[in-house]
Amino acid sequence: MGWFGVQSSSILVAVSMIFSWMYLGNTTVNVHGKTSRNKMLKMGKCDIYEGSWVVDETYPMYNSSSCPYIRKEFNCQKYGRPDQLYLQYRWQPRDCDLPGFDGKDFLRRFKGKKIMYIGDSLSLNHWQSMVCLLHVDVSDQSRILQETNDTISTFIFQDYDLSVMLFHSQYLVDIENEQNCRILKLDSLKNGEIWKNIDILVFNTWLWWYRTGPKQPWDYIQDGDNILKDMDRMLAFRKGLMTWAKWVDLEVDLTKTQVFFQGISPSHYNGKEWGKPGVTNCSKETQPISGSTYPAGLPPASHVLEEVLGSMTKPIHLLNVTNLSQLRKDAHPSTYNGLGNMDCTHWCLPGLLDTWNQLLYTTLIS
């Protein structure tokens, strides 16, 4: 996916390149966590998802008070969170350094493009992070246009003709009303006709697959020709993902559209997972887990997701944020969300999801 080429035709140029490499390889982080545009990233030798969290006093990448688009569910500082150390953690891969998120470069590089986040409220969370990361680098903010309809919310950065979009879809596959019943159809994906014409797609689903009771948005599941009252939810998740994967393989032109799938986003309601038996939420967590490994290991849904992606004939990129997010038990809103309820599922903004978008940016430019 790189667009850069380097040519040299003399010993002088070669020597110059060697000295440039030595210099760039030691570039350090600048203000607000940003690095030089020429930051060297050795993607071939580095898994950017393996690493640990380190304190960086130049973080966060923006202030919540300077981004007017953050919903109250995610605006932890506005709603009284007293600690601020959670804002100052930077993701440090084990074998390389990440380029800082450069909003001006992103706007110029993807001028005229459309990027769409597709999924549930975690996609909303992720999308709002990207909007704030770009907003901070726009000098005339009156040139940011906001549009909303029943399924798509869009921010248009008019000076760059760049659209950053959110498509709400809890399961990716369809829910249809038939004979006064809501049916979750595991083998139907009609919205793909809208999605496949977007330049960059970032998919996500998982949060709703185990939802039961009054908030469950369907009455029956259709699996092939069978209409069922319920079924094993992990199996249903796998079948729904397979429908999405087949759609990508058959319908998406990867020469025109880049496809990402966001890894499973963890919640932190069970302290046993991080060595604190009896803890039932994230309310008193103010620091990440040290090191690189979450004691409880990856959730089963992550293995299902990786198996489905591995079965595809077209290569798409897994934005593999699960483990690095598991380490951030401190990064949830808890009760500082404007609603008063306990939320250890979504994430404060600014915060962890800015790193998700930094990893997305890193992959797009590499």
Image (cartoon, rainbow, N blue to C red):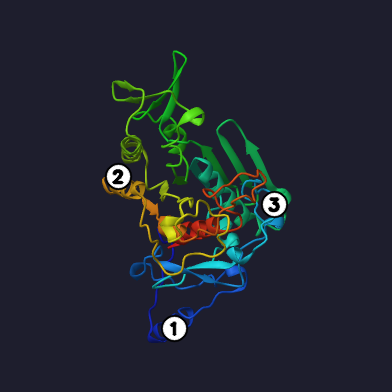
Q: Which residue is mark 1?
A: 22
Q: Which residue is mark 3?
A: 79
Q: Which residue is mark 2?
A: 308
Q: Secondary structure at mark 1?
A: helix
**Can the viewer see residue 364?**
no
Between 347 and 13, the one nearer to me in the picture: 347
What type is the residue that disc 1 sits on? Answer: Met
Q: Is residue 298 left or right of residue 33?
A: left
Q: CA distance from mark 3 to mark 2?
A: 40 Å
Q: Secondary structure at mark 2?
A: helix
* Image location of residue 186, percent across then percent down: 35, 30
For marks 3 and 2, give the one nearer the viewer: 3
Report the quarter where the N terminus lies. bottom left
Residue neighbourhood size for the residue with mark 2, other residues' Cα within 10 Å, grouped as few (<14), some (14–19), many (≥20)? some
Between 44 and 5, the one nearer to me in the picture: 44
What type is the residue that disc 3 sits on? Answer: Tyr
Mark 1 or mark 2, earlier in chain:
1
Residue neighbourhood size for the residue with mark 1, other residues' Cα within 10 Å, grouped as few (<14), some (14–19), many (≥20)? few
Q: CA distance from mark 3 to mark 1?
A: 46 Å
What type is the residue that disc 2 sits on? Answer: Val
For marks 3 and 1, give the one nearer the viewer: 3
Q: Is residue 236 left or right of residue 190?
A: left
Mark 3 in CB contact with mark 1 (< 8 angstroms)? no
Q: Secondary structure at mark 3?
A: loop
* Image location of residue 189, percent across then percent down: 39, 31
Q: Is residue 246 left or right of residue 126?
A: left
Residue at the (60%, 61%) spot, across then down = 104
